[in-house]
Amino acid sequence: MNLSAKIELLIQAKKLSASQFADTLGIPRSSISHILSGRNKPSLDVVQKILIAFPEIPAEELLDDKRDLSISAPAPKVAPSPIASTPSLFDAVIPGAPESPKNNLPEQTIVQSNLRRSRESSPKASQSVVAAPITTAHLAKKIERVIIFYTDGTFTESKPL
């Protein structure tokens, strides 16, 4: 019995889906899918993670094609997934998380200033330009750099003296 067949047998014996098995090992689900379909052979990394997650399986039985896999009853030990411990882009934002001091303007102020710029630069600029209220917080800020993006994909950067 080859290694891919033994992995499939292990998944069935533990009553896991392929996705649950991949999550248990902390590997991409596509990796298990490719192994089970025969497209790829299991890598050393996958074998090591299987042996860590399922310590009841002897390495010799898993790796030797001439030996059958004997699976005992203990439930799988879930290996810590580095992906699960790291927040993803889509995880909820924790309330009260500190914001960067460089980017703490309210969205309305940013939108208003962008609208004001586009109206002022327009050749048909009218006299009904809406100005955002100037506060002491705006006066205390210093310009760090100005970046101009062009339609051809290039840009220029300027820094104050």
Image (cartoon, rainbow, N blue to C red):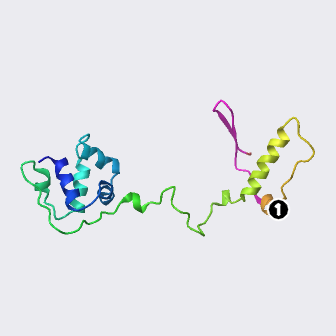
Q: Nearer the viewer, residue 46 or 76?
A: 76
Which quadrant of the figure contains the C terminus? top right
Position of 32 relative to 40 (above/below): below
Q: Residue furthest left?
A: 66
Is residue 103 positioned above or below 35 on the image? below
On screen, residue 84 versus residue 37, left or right, reads right
Asked if residue 33 lies left or right of residue 8, the reply is: right
Picture quadrant where residue 136 is located? bottom right
Q: Position of residue 36 (x, y in %)?
A: 25, 47
Q: Is residue 31 left or right of residue 145?
A: left
The kind of secondary structure element at disc 1 is loop
The answer to if 77 sits in the magenta stretch is: no
Q: Nearer the viewer, residue 49 or 101?
A: 49
View extreme (top): residue: 152
Q: Which residues are magenta?
A: 140-159
Q: Position of residue 53 (x, y in %)?
A: 25, 62
User: Count of labels shown?
Assistant: 1
Residue furthest right in the image: 127
Residue at image location 19% in from the left, 60% down from the top: 13
Disc 1 residue type? Thr
Residue 48 % position (x, y): 23, 55
**Snapshot quadrant of residue 50:** bottom left
Local crowd size for mark 1, using a 10 Å CA cut-off: few (<14), some (14–19), many (≥20): few
Name the residue beneath numbered marker 1. Answer: 135
Please state which of residues 151 and 17 is positioned toward the viewer in this rendering.
17
Vertical placement of residue 161 versus 149, above or below: below
Q: Residue at x 68, y 60 (%)?
A: 104
What's the residue at 6%, 49% (across, down)? 66
In the picture, residue 57 is in which quadrant?
Answer: bottom left
